[in-house]
Image (cartoon, rainbow, N blue to C red):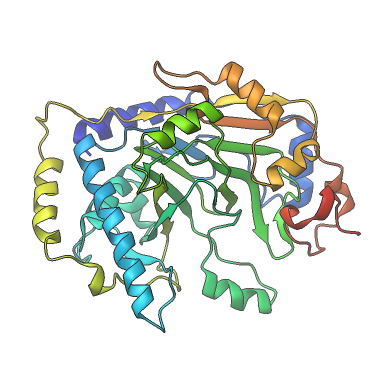
Amino acid sequence: MSTHGRTILASLLLVAVSTPPAKPSEDYQAAEAAAAASAAQTFGPLVKGGFIAGPGFAVLDDVLEPRLLEVLRARAVEQFAMEDAFAEASTTEARWGTTWLELDRQGAPPAKTPIELLLREYAKIVVGPDGDGGRFAGVDYWLQNRPPEHPKEYHSDTDTLLCRKAEKRGRECRNAALSTVLFLDAGCGGPTLVFNQSFNRFGLVPRVPGEIIIVPCHANRLLAFNGSLYHGVAHPVMPKKSQAQCKGQNDQLSPPRRLTLLANFWPRKSKESKPLRPGLVKPSDEADMADLRSILHNNDLPYQADTSLVRPVTLNFPGTFDLDFDSWGKQEIPSKVRRLWKRGGHGKPGTSWWQRPAWIRYQKVSPIEAQIPPDQRVPSWVLWSGGESPSA
């Protein structure tokens, strides 16, 4: 990631401050405030000092130079295979864990792999070279390599070990301060969905979402959002003909998979994260990182990353989320959303409508909000059968 790329990004983010999105309707704001003023989330590409800051979200394209992306993608595939082998040989380690990495500051341990080196680089864009004045200590990160037909379920990024203890004591759970998704390979996969909901000890607030961000899986795209927000992945949204073409471009012996590098930013180390296992460091990593550093510090490359802030297309719907409850619950994009997205979703040349992020906004508040007391504990709406609210 070049200095040139960082300069472009900072200027674009600063421009975003002067053109905030339109505010939600008054009844929507009132309902959110009544539910829980401290936990209510309204989306907006908010920034601080030229860098992304929450609450809100931001989508950035062309984050890394092509060569750096290729190195990161190849090393991610290798590490994923190494983790598989490690898990199969171990009877005590969990199959999927998170690795802790301190941000790049004086006294921090050196990066051990190309993944950690590049992660620290794009962290400088997300929270600034000083970790937003020291507010962020580091990230816990992991890789996902999923087939399109098995999208990640809805969830919130938490410190799982501490949350289990907090739930038993009736206390609030600890969320990541900022969550990021770096798409390394689209693999015909579906988009990431982020809802305007956060958990407290009684469940999600608001109980039913009114806004959803759809961020299509696109190689070299970075999504950053408030770490408390409820999110997951939908089934592929591209037309069937395009899906067939996408799958046909891949080797039959290696089915297309959605490859992402996930990194959550924390003010202090998360309890569940661990240092990188020594077995995941390759002998060639040191030489590879030396090459990467030479690229990162070379400002005279013939090609510089043209990092850009991607503005989502805003899609307003007159009804409530309840009307599309079943589709969202099945991790599918409702047909009426697809139709409107198709009409307004074309962005820069060469980009299809299903590759451009969309901001879904339901203009009316679900009547379920008034039926459930704010201090009644209920499960996530995804677990409600038939779209019925729990009895009050």
Query: Where does the N terminus fall, quadrant-wise?
Result: top left
Q: Is residue 356 visible?
A: no
Above or below, comparing residue 195 to residue 339 in the picture: below
Residue at 24% x, 42% y is 70
> In the displayed structure, does residue 313 sit left or right of residue 100?
right
Q: Name the residue nearer the viewer: 324 or 230.
A: 324
Residue sticking out furthest to the front: 252
> In the displayed structure, does residue 374 sit left or right of residue 63?
right
Q: Name the residue nearer the viewer: 221 or 385.
A: 385
Pinpoint residue 369: horizontal percent, then vertical percent.
83, 47
Pinpoint residue 80: horizontal percent, then vertical percent.
33, 60
Residue sticking out furthest to the bottom: 92
Above or below, comparing residue 282 to residue 360 in the picture: below
Pinpoint residue 276: horizontal percent, then vertical percent.
29, 69
Above or below, comparing residue 275 to residue 211 in the picture: below
> In the displayed structure, does residue 225 sit left or right of residue 13?
right
Q: Quadrant of residue 224?
A: top left
Residue at 30% x, 54% y is 77
Above or below, comparing residue 178 to residue 70 in the picture: below
Q: Quadrant of residue 217?
A: top left
Pinpoint residue 339: horizontal percent, then vertical percent.
66, 22
Callout count: 0
Q: Is residue 162 visible?
A: yes
Query: Where does the C terminus fall, quadrant-wise?
Result: bottom right
Q: Name the residue nearer the viewer: 288 or 311.
A: 288
